[in-house]
Image: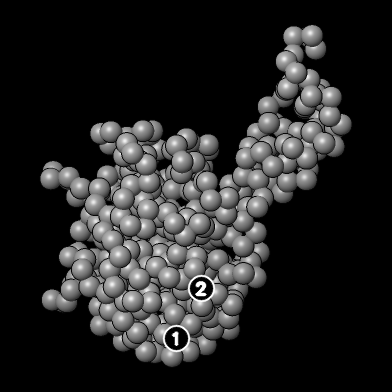
Amino acid sequence: MREDLGAAERQVIDLSLDEIARILFFLPLAHDIALAGMSCRSLRDAARLALKARPFSSEVVTLTGHTSAVWSVAAVPDGRIITGSYDTVRVWREGACERTIGGGRVVAALPGGARFVSASHDRTAKLWTFDGGLACTFAVGNYVHSVAALPDGVHFVVGLSNGYGLPAEVRLYHVDGTRVHTFTGHTNLVKAVAVTPDGQHIISGSNDKLVKVWSVSSKSLVSTCIGHFSWSHSHFVHAVAAMPDGKRILSGSVDSTVRVWRLNGTLELDPERTFGPAFGAVSELHTGAVNALVALPDNQHALAASVATVKLFNVNDGALLRTFRHHAENVYCLALLPDGLRFVSGSYDNTARIAYHGLAPQ
């Protein structure tokens, strides 16, 4: 059998067990290789070593206690998790509820691990400390549909409704209560906001079917991403995310597609880079509305949430790596945990769940 192997294959087989294990350790799906029951003894044993070295588990930790859908989740550097719901905001540590605070549909943790923001349909945003102290209340005056923290730890951004005769807006706040700037241009409620890793750009997705990129420094519109559009369907944009390189962004829509954009508003590749069942799509990802997105540290993969599923995919070609079915209802939110190996998802089933995505550590 060894005589049938090519030179490259023989070079791999001739490596020591530890050397092969080290290679497998960094493969995206090393744990799948380890569980595949390969007939090649060297690769099988090396894969098992890689599996032991890689902290991967199929275990799912369920956070229960909410009596309403979990609409938002956020991760804190020390490992705590924040969940937002109409009933309460909850802070979790190691699977147990550490603190319960008044309701807040959307939440965001400020870098530094000392404070977080919650907001809901009471037309306010609130800044909290993790001991439950209310540090500041922001009289927004409109429904808050989305919130994201800037990496400087002292600014956050909210996406607002177009209710009460008010325009749909994206607002930038300082934690001292100052409204720094209001970005206008969306014509329907701003369903999702995100910030690039360098803090220089804000990304917003709206029910006007558009994704917009805003400059934090110049307080101006950088680009408008047009693609989630149909004359016959409401292709609202429910999710946006920034890739770690800060050069690409992701958007997810009711049209069931995920799109990859450059900051200048163009699709990442030509032909059109669209992942989903829509016309012209290069691969099928979800068949229902894409409600949440989170990019992974390797800058090549992301997670997308939809109807009772979370899917791990490659942002370069749309290849689907894994489907997670650990929720019973629609999944509305996602966050990556600080270890970079696990994610937390929130659902209409009133739970948040922690799972390993299974990619190699960065």
Between 105 and 117, the one nearer to me in the picture: 117
Instruction: Identify the mark nearer the N-term, 1 or 2.
Output: 2
Residue drawn at point x = 62 percent, y = 44 percent: 359
Visual colour scheme: one colour
Q: Name the quadrant containing residue 213.
A: bottom left
Residue drawn at point x = 23 percent, y = 54 percent: 209
Residue 171 visible in rendering: no
Is residue 222 positioned above or below 268 on the image?
Answer: below
Residue 52 visible in rendering: yes
* Residue wearing tag 1: 175
Specify whether 294 is left or right of 188.
right
In space, the residues marked 1 and 2 are separated at their CA atoms by 13 Å
Q: Amino acid at mark 2?
A: Pro
Residue drawn at point x = 46 percent, y = 44 percent: 315
Between 310 and 53, the one nearer to me in the picture: 53
Q: Are marks 1 and 2 in contact (CB under 8 Å)?
A: no
Specify whether 288 is left or right of 91.
left
Other residues around mark 1 within 10 Å, as few (<14) / some (14–19) / many (≥20):
many
- Element under disc 2: loop
